[in-house]
Amino acid sequence: MAREVSAAILHLRYNGRSEELPLAELGLNRQASEAEIKQAVARYLDVACELLAPYVVVRTSQAIIVRPEALYG
């Protein structure tokens, strides 16, 4: 029987800094919706959820990433 080696992580890039947070610490799991993720991050940062509207949520096999939208050109 396989077991999970590491906890699910949320990688956050906000206001010039990066943090890695266990999803469980935010009250989330890997199946959380984008809205649930942004609400939990807003609570963690103690900011209005609307400030995270332009942020994107990217899911990888190793983490969920919340970051500003990348602008090119």
Image (cartoon, rainbow, N blue to C red):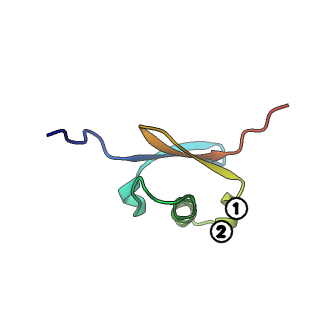
Asked which secondary structure carries label 1, the reply is helix
Give the farthest residue toward the left.
Answer: 1
**Amino acid at the residue labelled 2:** Ala
Q: Is residue 12 visible?
A: no
Give how far across and how far down residue 69 sits, in percent. Answer: 71, 44
Task: Please report the residue visible at 29 percent of the width from the left and 41 percent of the height from the top.
Answer: 6
The reply to whether dot 2 and dot 1 touch (C-beta < 8 Å) is yes
Residue matched to label 1:
51
Q: CA distance from mark 2 to mark 1?
A: 6 Å
- Looking at the image, the residue that sits furthest to the right is 73
Secondary structure beneath dot 2 equals loop
Residue at position x 41%, y 37% from top? Answer: 62
Residue 57 in percent (x, y) is at 58, 49
Q: Would you call the spot at circle 1 few (<14 residues within 10 Å), some (14-19), or many (20 or more)?
A: few
- Name the residue nearer the viewer: 17 or 72: 72
Quadrant for residue 31, please give it.
Answer: bottom left
Q: Nearer the viewer, residue 14 or 68?
A: 68
Residue 67 in percent (x, y) is at: 62, 45
Please tell me how many numbered marks the rendered image carries.
2
Looking at the rendered structure, the kind of residue marked 1 is Leu
Residue 24 lies left or right of residue 20; in this view the side is left
**Quarter residue 72 falls in:** top right
Image-based side of 3 in relation to 27, left or right? left
> To which residue does mark 2 refer?
48
Q: Position of residue 54 (x, y in %)?
A: 72, 54
Quarter of the image with the C terminus is top right
- Mark identifier at residue 62: none
Identify the image quadrant of residue 26.
bottom left
